[in-house]
Amino acid sequence: SKYCPGSPAARHARCAMTVNFPSNTCNQVKFEMMSRMTNAEWIDPHNGGQYILHDASSGPESFIQGSRITGDGHYTDKFMLTLNPGDSGNSCQLVACSQSQVFSILDYSTNYCNLRNLYCSEGDGCVNANAVENTDLAGYVEDYVDCKQNAKSKCIVSSR
């Protein structure tokens, strides 16, 4: 689909979902997600993986394309984030999709965490990267489209 980055592996783990932010604008959501991807001081809570920003667009339906290298450096997953402003302009819908790039069936919620850790709130135990606006993305609702493994408890694991 146009909302997923694609994968060369015929069978691969993935997570596709929509996330609704009822009290944040898309600019706020996008700014926090990009801050987490690019701020060297922000630490990925899922075993200290590394996010890489590949591309981003502005405009009404903006997108972010990136990848995440696992903490052990063995695997790279690609993801795509598409932001659609709500009718009022004060809410935002995120269409998020992460896909493993190698043959995989189970991923222990890794593709889910690749996405969730970019927007999870302080109430979830996550740390915000954007100190300027200090906007916590609380109250979001996740709707799983194709994301069978989505254990939140797997997303915050410190690397040993």
Image (cartoon, rainbow, N blue to C red):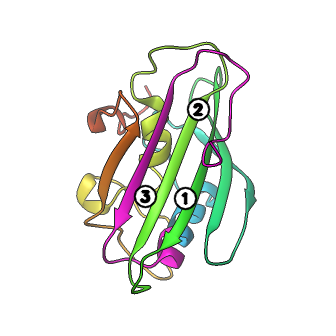
* Tag nearer the camera, 3 or 2: 2
Tell me residue 59's x, y (percent).
67, 78
Badges 1 and 2: C-beta atoms under 8 Å apart? no
**Nearest the eye: 70 or 112:** 112
Residue holding disc 2 = 99
Circle count: 3
Q: How far apart in space, not on screen, are marks 1 and 3 (Cα)?
A: 9 Å
How crowded pointer 3 is (Cα within 10 Å; few <14, some 14-19, many 20+) is rated as many
SS for callout 1: helix
Placement of 5 over or under 108, stated as above or below: below
Of pointers 1 and 3, the one earlier in the residue sequence:
1
Q: Which residue is mark 3?
A: 119
Mark 3 or mark 2: name the one nearer the start of the chain: 2
Residue 68 drawn in magenta: no
Q: Residue, x 65% and y 48% (percent of image)?
A: 2
1 relative to 31, above or below: above
Q: Residue at x 36, y 55 (%)?
A: 120
Q: Nearer the viewer, residue 44 or 25?
A: 25
Amino acid on which the number 1 mark rests in the picture? Arg
Residue 72 % position (x, y): 59, 23
Q: Which residues are magenta?
A: 1-29
Any part of residue 130 in sight: no
Q: Give the mark, 1 or 2, whose residue is nearer the N terminus.
A: 1
Q: Which residue is mark 1?
A: 36
